[in-house]
Image (spheres, helix red, strand yellow):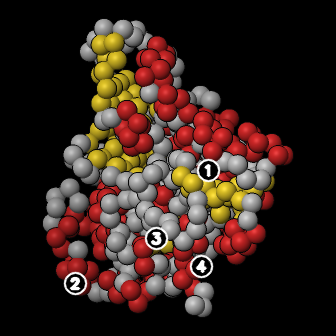
């Protein structure tokens, strides 16, 4: 692109005295990796591409679904079923053809994470699960990459900048494990599919993440280094906390690449009895065979309501106290996406031991409904 | 001495956005009192901040202390 065009495209930010042509040059030279092209990733990507970040990597192995569109504002109905990383790349390339955008249509694992992250200056975490979040954090600590963190639940969001020294001479760089040393187990904390999320919330938090990234690159303002900001969309309350490093944290993080490769992040967050999980077909067969109690472990108000099969409602938190309601030899627990029901199988197996068989509907009632819609009538 | 606590996310669902707890002198006794009043908090993961600083160990509170409890979020 000619210098004239370049000047014109970024004119309104270049004329900011703090920013200037120097700031623009820094952005054009910067390489930013956005992990997760979902609720947080979409707005972050839009602003980073628009601002002229020279190289942007987009990691996501998921495809666009209709229930993404209320918050993942890059995509349209025509994109349903298509790769998010690839669609985001094409859409953003139309917005700004002069920057380089690289899609990674793959799932991050310990095998590819270090190689991909190593290519970039700043990493943005817009993922939707703890195992990937902890893996990204640890990889950024190992490779000494600043990590722009954002996470959301229902109406609230958190933003921070991890793994970056506040002052060059200081050696204290706080990371995610200084805040939450160990991952919660699967189902302990609900994700968007289970807890719900107001569509505009990731728009706000993802935009804040882009802002933090731009400040880090250009050196303007005060990025959220060693701080955690929380935002509540219902009452607009913003709460900012100071974080400090813990001595013990380093011992929780793999000490080198070899140890990182051997760490099983899925397992750290997963329930141990995956064999208890059944798919929709098995679920239907078990019900047809009889001698089974189906238990809805969601909260009582959760939708969709189920009238397709007989079941009893016992929210997960009350399950242990109400297990006497379950009489049959076989128990199938279900919830929204299959996480809480997996927790339920642990609780129920603990209570009933070998006297009953306990199952969890994989993918939850949402998956079951989808599978059912596909069946010929 | 009554201490005001603000809660976030799932914790606010359990106990409300803000609660006051009487007769606690430090964060350990505050957690015990909270667990008694709201048993569901017992098995919930969170960090404690006193006067906007995340703490790592038991911390003495005074009547002006502002305590916040924050859970981890995974959504993106």
Judging by the rendered image, the residue that carries numbered circle 1 is A186
Task: Point out the frontmost of discs 1 and 3.
Answer: 1
Name the residue tied to disc 2: A4
Q: Disc 1 or disc 4, which is closer to the eye?
A: 4
Secondary structure of the residue carrying tag 2 is helix
Work out whether residue A232 or residue A215 is closer to the camera in this orientation and state it: A232
In the rendered image, residues at marks 1 and 3 fall on the same chain: yes
* Disc number placed over residue A37 in the picture, else none: 3
The image quadrant of residue A317 is top right
Dot 1 or dot 2, earlier in sequence: 2
Q: Earlier in the sequence, mark 3 or mark 4?
A: 3
In the rendered image, residues at marks 1 and 4 fall on the same chain: yes
Return the disc, 3 or 2, that comes first in the chain's sequence: 2
Query: Secondary structure under badge 1?
Result: loop
Q: Within 10 Å of the Cα at label 3, are there few (<14), some (14-19), or many (20+) other Cα atoms?
A: many
Query: Which residue was labeled with disc 4?
Result: A371
Q: Give the image location of residue A72, x and y in percent.
A: 38, 72
Specify whether B57 is left or right of A206.
right
Chain letter, disc 2 residue? A
Task: Say which quadrant the C terminus of chain A sits in.
Answer: bottom right
Tag 1 near tag 2, CB within 8 Å: no
Residue displayed at 15% across by 66% down? A15
Along the line of sight, which residue is nearer the eye, A53 or B15?
Answer: B15
Badges 4 and 2, same chain = yes
Between marks 1 and 2, how big is the CA–CA gap?
53 Å
Q: Look at the picture and state if B24 lies above or below A200.
A: above
Q: Nearer the viewer, mark 1 or mark 2?
A: 1
Label 4, residues with CA under 10 Å away: few <14, some 14-19, many ≥20: few
Which callout, 4 or 2, points at the residue further toward the start of the chain? 2
> Subunit of mark 1?
A
């Amino acid at each position: 692109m000619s210098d004239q065009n370049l000047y014109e495209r970024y004119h309104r930010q270049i004329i900011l005295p703090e920013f200037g042509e120097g700031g623009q040059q820094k952005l054009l030279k910067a390489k930013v990796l956005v992990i997760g092209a979902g609720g947080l990733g979409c707005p972050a990507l839009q602003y980073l591409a628009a601002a002229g970040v020279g190289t942007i990597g987009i990691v996501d192995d998921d495809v666009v679904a209709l229930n993404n569109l209320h918050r993942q504002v890059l995509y349209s109905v025509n994109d349903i079923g298509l790769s998010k990383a690839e669609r985001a790349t094409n859409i953003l390339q139309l917005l700004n053809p002069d920057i380089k955008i690289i899609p990674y249509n793959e799932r991050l694992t310990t095998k590819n994470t270090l190689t991909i992250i190593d290519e970039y200056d700043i990493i943005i975490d817009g993922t939707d699960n703890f195992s990937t979040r902890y893996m990204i954090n640890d990889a950024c600590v190992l490779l000494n990459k600043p990590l722009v963190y954002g996470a959301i639940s229902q109406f609230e969001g958190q933003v921070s900048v991890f793994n970056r020294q506040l002052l060059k001479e200081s050696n204290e760089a706080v990371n995610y494990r200084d805040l939450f040393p160990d991952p919660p187990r699967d189902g302990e904390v609900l994700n968007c599919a289970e807890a719900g999320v107001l569509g505009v919330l990731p728009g706000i938090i993802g935009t804040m993440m882009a802002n933090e990234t731009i400040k880090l690159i250009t050196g303007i303002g005060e990025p959220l280094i060693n701080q955690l900001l929380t935002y509540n969309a219902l009452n607009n309350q913003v709460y900012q906390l100071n974080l400090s490093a813990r001595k013990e944290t380093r011992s929780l993080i793999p000490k080198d690449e070899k140890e990182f490769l051997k760490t099983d992040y899925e397992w750290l967050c997963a329930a141990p009895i995956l064999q208890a999980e059944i798919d929709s077909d098995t679920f239907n067969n078990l019900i047809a065979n009889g001698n089974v109690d189906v238990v809805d472990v969601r909260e009582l108000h959760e939708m969709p309501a189920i009238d397709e099969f007989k079941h009893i409602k016992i929210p997960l938190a009350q399950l242990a106290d109400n297990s006497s309601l379950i009489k049959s030899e076989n128990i199938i627990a279900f919830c929204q996406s299959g996480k809480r029901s997996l927790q339920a199988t642990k609780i129920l197996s603990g209570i009933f031991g070998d006297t009953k068989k306990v199952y969890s509907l994989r993918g939850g009632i949402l998956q079951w409904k989808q599978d059912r819609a596909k069946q010929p009538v | 001495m009554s201490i005001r606590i603000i809660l976030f996310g799932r914790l606010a669902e359990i106990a409300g956005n803000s609660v006051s707890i009487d007769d606690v002198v430090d964060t350990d006794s505050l957690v015990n009192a909270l667990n008694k009043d709201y048993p569901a908090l017992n098995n919930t993961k969170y960090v404690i901040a006193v006067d906007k600083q995340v703490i790592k160990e038991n911390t003495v509170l005074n009547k002006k202390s502002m305590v916040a409890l924050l859970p981890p979020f995974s959504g993106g």
